[in-house]
Amino acid sequence: MIKVCFVTGGRMDYGHLYKVMKEINESPKFELQIIATCMHLSPEFGLTFQRIKDDGFKINKKVECLLSSDTPSAVAKSVGIACISFSDAFMDLNPDLIVLMGDRYEILAASQVALLMKIRIAHISGGDTTEGAYDESIRHSITKMSHLHFVTNIDAYKRVIQLGENPKYIFNVGSPTIDYILDTPMIRKEELAQKLEFKMKKVNIIFTYHPVTLNPEKNKNDLMIILNALSDLGSDVGILITKANADDGGRILNHEIDHFTSKHKNAKSYDALGQYLYYNCINIFDCVVGNSSSGLFEVPSFKKPTVNIGDRQKGRIKSNSVIDCAVNKKEILKAISRALSMNCDNIVNPYGEGKSATKIVSLLETIDIKKISLQKHFYS
């Protein structure tokens, strides 16, 4: 059996990987291996590795790498610690293929180690652009270390070719997170409110704001402008907040979010909801606000509007349900008002309509992975 090892660092990539992992696990050709790392193992971010186990998966290795500080220096040290730990994990598991998703720094560490240990890499979601974060450089770096590329849209497909990758190994499969959405059972509003211990209002929004890593000095100030705008929505609007991730500056943002919710009875924050509750929130709530990629990848599949604030997602393709606005109180309130009056029934998600995981696994079953050359050539 071909040993296929998935590396997942937190809630943001696990939702994308879940269905692919499930189908790999069910394939007679493959042996599934899972390494949980970074935010999955942190109490501060909800110990979300437990959700992987609750889904019926075995975690083969846990790689601790996240330092308690979130300064740029601490993030760089976390990458170093991750590299040391991944080398031991890969040596023990001896995988034939590493599957990586996206553009986070712990995933960069895994790709570096796999490259040096001569392990082939399959990368999901390469070729996208996010001009407001250093994720942009990380994503393209992982692409150059990878041997198989499963992209989510045609623009990304063209960019990966532009990076010199052979089209023979680039596959436009859409986003596998949509598969997870389609498999998630939806519950009634009353049941969701009870599970969340959240008092629903006539209008309810979801808010998530992650650090903009290329402009860290503005993160706190920008968040305060946005929270001030949300405050002006009034107590008749329910605000559910999912906290920032472990990028540098994230803890400062989460501290301000806690202060905001302590002063506003109509708002409540969560370290991590998990896909089941989060997708049910999107399904029932009226709109999504912030700068998370979820507003672009996932929310359009629910026929709901997204208010995308700032530059963190700049460059990504977007559906017509996504409203871009600057970090400006007046613009934010105007964008939210517009979103709440939108009809999104005919919205098409540019990242596909599902079955991406089946496409990925079917392709892997037909490719002789061990015969893919480790020696890569620039495709001109």
Image (spheres, grey):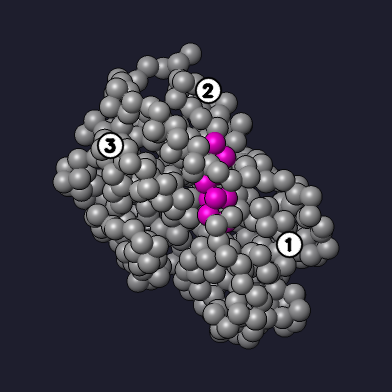
Is residue 120 rendered to the left or right of residue 206? Answer: left
Foreground label between 3 and 1: 3
Is disc 1 in contact with disc 2, using a CB cutoff of under 8 Å?
Answer: no
Cα distance between the residues tagged 3 and 2: 30 Å
Residue 254 can be seen, yes or no: no
The residue shown at (66%, 42%) is 350
Magenta part of the chain:
173-181
Q: Residues within 10 Å of mark 1 (few under 14, many from 20)?
A: many
Q: Which residue is mark 1?
A: 332
Q: Which mark is residue 17?
A: none
Q: Is residue 257 visible?
A: yes
Q: Nearer the viewer, residue 125 or 334?
A: 125
Q: Residues within 10 Å of mark 2 (few under 14, many from 20)?
A: some
Q: Is residue 6 magenta?
A: no
Disc number at residue 162? 2
Which corner quadrant of the image does residue 66 belong to?
bottom left
Q: Earlier in the sequence, mark 1 or mark 2?
A: 2
Q: Secondary structure at mark 2?
A: helix
Q: What residue is disc 3 on?
A: 2
Q: Residue at the spot x=37%, y=52% of the render?
A: 8
Quadrant in which the N terminus appears: top left
